Image: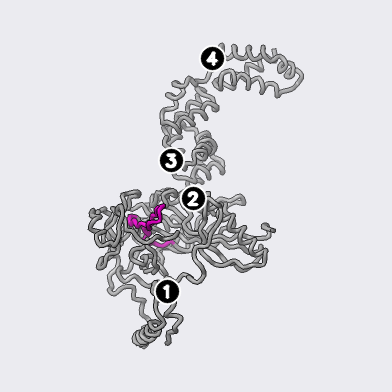
Amino acid sequence: MAISKEEVIHIAKLACLNLSEQEIEGYTKDMQEILEFANMINDVNTEGLNETIAANEKCNVLRKDEVRNFGNRELLLQNAPSQDEGMFRIPKVLN
Amino acid sequence: MAREDYEIVIGLEVHCELSTKTKIFCSCSTEFGGEPNTHCCPICMAMPGTLPVLNEKVVEYAVKAGLATNCSIEKNSKNDRKNYFYPDNPKSYQISQFDKPLCYDGHVTIETEDGEKEIRIERIHIEEDAGKLNHDEYGRGSFVDLNRAGVPLIEVVSKPDMRSAKEVEAYMRKLKSIFEYIEISDCKMQEGSLRADVNVSVRKKGAAEFGTRTEMKNMNSFRSIVRAIDYEADRQIELIEAGEKVVQETLRWDDVSGRTFSMRDKEDAQDYRYFPEPDLVALKVSDEYIENIRKSLPELPESRRKRYIEEYELTEKAANFVTGSKYYSILFEESIKVCNNPKTVGNLIMSDIARILNEREEEPEDLKFGGAELGELVTLIDKGTISSAIAKKVLEELFNEVKMPSKIIEEKGWVQISDEGAIKEVVMKVLENNPQSIADYKAGKDKALGFLVGQAMKETRGKANPQMLNKMFLDELNK
């Protein structure tokens, strides 16, 4: 299994990362190693087993539909680099 | 351009906000229109270390929607993570469903000019809504309000089974009406609780393959959807006729200019890297659970429609119309309890009430008066207290202020004149002023009678009893 430079560039774009030429080379090598490590899983015989959905066997962990408001906007916004009128202020997004 | 040589193919992804009290993965209120970021908590704001817990009502409502649209229910379901970056999405992923949607393989029936048509539903899955971005006029930036982030949605994905804007409207109206009947959403399009992504392609009639499609996102009015489809189909046909190619892309419909604009280029081909949501466990639905929900469903529009035709002898057209909205249907059933005249109630809803709503640019759910008022109005017509011309005026009044119709006609002095002496007086006066009409009538022109009755109605400002007028004119003219 080999990962191409183009794939790294594509993934970087999806992750909104700007990588230098040098970084792309580094990541290509690193990701190749990670993939090879993960490739071990392909040696396991999984015949007759269902897909694992979660890390444990539990299912249907559900909540009642009852409102409990957090009620502290200041606390939620306290780490925002910029805010205005109770909202996160961010660079202008064109729509 | 030979538009009639082409077939338009349309598929819809309808997003519907569920009317649960709380969000899908946390206990924040879903109420619309609160102060920014006041219906938020560390979970829906995606603070590190928080974990989602699924709202049981979301599962119930989605299964309801599935059963009401003839879907199969997935007994081994799960949630998946859909990755994308946008500032209205604080986690940088949306928890949605990928390969095991809760409901699949359903259909709804729509009424078209060529009769009934089945629109297949590929799947219905549950997911969370995104927040809202506000922009100011001074370009100081954008402002993020996450009240809507985490509000539960179902996404209803149709097969590309629609062939015209009209069919799309009929399909959307049908979904809206079903979801209103089963009370899983308020379906308010203007508040965005019902919106659609519209996929349009065109192909030469008889072609086996579909053409390249474009997608218009977040359409939230019937009018825009119809206009946008017509525009987009024309644009694609023009491209093809000019020997060019339709590019698969996401478009934005602009209501003001009546055009579509490209939103993303092809390079950014969507790649969401779905994987099973590790913060949630599996979702298993038992047969018993499904059957209990099936039993709890109210009577759906399809069955009501048949019942109205059989039990109340409504015309097919009236029955379709009245059951097309839960609010019309309730108004109808409440009214006939009062007046026991389903035909007239059905006709008033289909003609006058629908027309006035349309003029006011309102929807059936905006109706302020109910069965008590409409029922009494029909009783007053039936008793001859008012004419149907006056009834229309009373309806207009009901839209302005809810009052009992008997009170309105009393206040306005609109009681029908059924007093023989008073009517005779008017008839004699009209005859005296229109000798030519008398001569015309005697010469065999029956139309003259209609003219005379019309004059008498004008004279009494619509209040004279038309049957009495007719009879009295005839009596006088045939003397």
Label 4–label 2 contact, CB within 8 A: no
Same subunit, labels 3 and 1: the answer reads: no
Q: Nearer the viewer, residue B58 or B355?
A: B355
Amino acid on which disc 4 is placed: Asp
* Eye-nearest disc, 1 or 4: 1
- Mark 4 chain: B
Q: Which residue position holds label 3? A: B366
- Callout 4 environment at 10 Å: few (<14), some (14 to 19), or many (20+)? few
In the structure shown, which secondary structural element does the residue marked by tag 1 occupy?
helix
Q: Nearer the viewer, residue B309 or A46?
A: A46
Per the rendered image, the range of residues in magenta is B124-147
User: Residue B455, located in which quarter of the rendered image?
Assistant: top right
Q: Which residue position holds label 2? A: B221
Amino acid on which disc 1 is placed: Lys
* Residue located 44% across and 84% down the image: A4
Q: Which residue position holds label 4? A: B419
Q: Earlier in the sequence, mark 4 or mark 2?
A: 2
Q: Decide if residue A27 is on the left or right side of residue B9.
A: left
* Eye-nearest disc, 4 or 3: 3
> Alpha carbon of mark 4 to alpha carbon of mark 3: how far?
39 Å
> Alpha carbon of mark 1 to alpha carbon of mark 4: how far?
84 Å
What is the x, y in percent for residue B454? 63, 22
The quarter of the picture where the C terminus of chain B appears is top right
Residue B295 is a magenta residue: no
- Callout 3 environment at 10 Å: few (<14), some (14 to 19), or many (20+)? few
- Callout 1 environment at 10 Å: few (<14), some (14 to 19), or many (20+)? few
In the structure shown, which secondary structural element does the residue marked by tag 2 occupy?
loop
In the structure shown, which secondary structural element does the residue marked by tag 4 occupy?
loop
Residue B114 vs B373, above or below: the answer is below
Q: Which residue position holds label 1? A: A13
Amino acid on which disc 2 is placed: Ser
> Alpha carbon of mark 1 to alpha carbon of mark 2: how far?
34 Å
